[in-house]
Image (cartoon, rainbow, N blue to C red):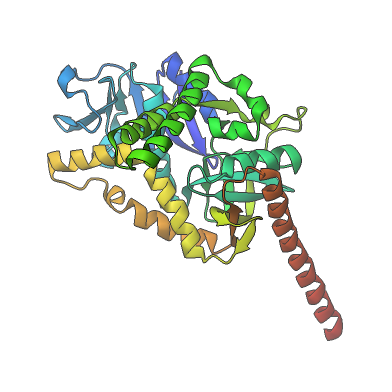
Amino acid sequence: MSLVIRVAGEPVIQLHDCPVSISKAIKREFHDVQEVLDGMTGVADFEFCFGDTPAVPPDQALIGVVHRYGDRYFGFDRLGAAYELPFGPRHARKAQPLSISPSVSADFLLPNILIPLIHLSLLPRNGSLIHSAAVAMRDSAIVLAAWGGTGKTSTLISLMRHQGGQFLADDLAAVTADVTVYSLGNTINVLDYNLRAYGDLRRHFGPAARFAATLRRVLGRVGSTAGRYLGGDSVIAGVAARLAKDAKALANAKIPAELVEGLPQGPERVSHAPARLVIVLERGAADAPKEFALSTRDAAAVMTSALVHEFSKLLTTYRAYRGLVGATALPELESLESLTLERLERILGRTTVLGLRLPVGSDDHGTVAQRIMQLAGNLDGRADAQQESQELVRRKSR
């Protein structure tokens, strides 16, 4: 059995003889996954075959370590399970699928290997991944871009629950040259601070996530108190901050979008929609959400930086590979940020881009969602006015 991950209708990654644990994780996380019985060799951009890989000494089983075996190169997850790096000549990769250990961690494979490779497949097609939330509204998409912790997930939930939005993306989506946004994932990553606005989602948190959330709140108070009385550079404040950061990784739950939506089962899920409005969220308003002018390039820069930050593991491995072989087999990785910026600036130039500054410390995401809907409605009004004006011009010319 093979699994094919499709993005924007195109087969991007194929996984042959996929283990059950990896298969379940992929079906849970990716939206467009196809099961194939007879194989599709030569169709997908990247193909992996699960099976035997070279043994790795335990002391070398570290992120970023690269081993060379003949003309093949292998990286390793946190437990030493190997995956072949797609850094060789393209014709050689097409002749034989890349190898990957059946014991590789799904938590490592999906975000650190598969997601970056999907992005590398989209760039030559004039598309890109975007680190953004997105909802479909009346057959078009509203995209919310922001750095983590700004409020895009909570705003997304409010748009879904109270404004009729249909889920497209929480963290990652694909956008093509015609400014169509394609859903990539199935789940919404709800962190402990999202529960302040949506406490009902707490039931989806397991025991470990609940404990980590409580621990993070306690450590936050310890760090704040230590910083106030001992200084921000004190050992206690530093240790508390580090432990709180580690706890944050556990204080979350990946919840299927239909469960987060909290509404009766609606029509079949929307898989893509043309982008009508891109809003970049940031904090800093005094008392109410306030829009501000934002250039297309500045919006593309925010989306690019947030996206490339997610690819740190693959970039670390790539640098280790280049140090080992002294060659540039995938030059697009070296210039990944500039290529992505150029691509997104071109794509965003074909839609409307705005900035929206949110009140500092406010959890009133309902008001934010209402303001977003007003901004989207204003676009409709301008479009209607433009159509009326064009119609008047046509009548006068008769």
- How many numbered dots are placed on residues in this image? 0
- Whether residue 351 is visible to the viewer of this picture, yes or no, is no
Seen at 52% across and 55% down, the residue is: 177
Residue 127 in the figure: left or right of residue 245: right
Residue sitting at the far front: 229
Q: Nearer the viewer, residue 222 or 383?
A: 222
Seen at 20% across and 31% down, the residue is: 65
Seen at 51% across and 64% down, the residue is: 296
Q: Nearer the viewer, residue 374 or 283?
A: 283
Q: Nearer the viewer, residue 190 or 245?
A: 245
Seen at 34% across and 32% down, the residue is: 242
- Residue 84 x %, y %: 27, 29
Q: Nearer the viewer, residue 260 or 10?
A: 260
180 versus 24 height, above or below: below
Quarter-wise, where is residue 205 in the image?
A: top right
Quarter-wise, where is residue 200 in the image?
A: top right
Residue 241 in the figure: left or right of residue 135: left
Residue 147 in the figure: left or right of residue 278: left
Q: Which corner quadrant holds the C terminus?
A: bottom right
- Whether residue 183 is visible to the viewer of this picture, yes or no, is yes
- Residue 339 x %, y %: 37, 56
- Residue 113 x %, y %: 36, 33
Quarter-wise, where is residue 377 in the image?
A: bottom right
384 versus 26 height, above or below: below
- Residue 126 x %, y %: 46, 54
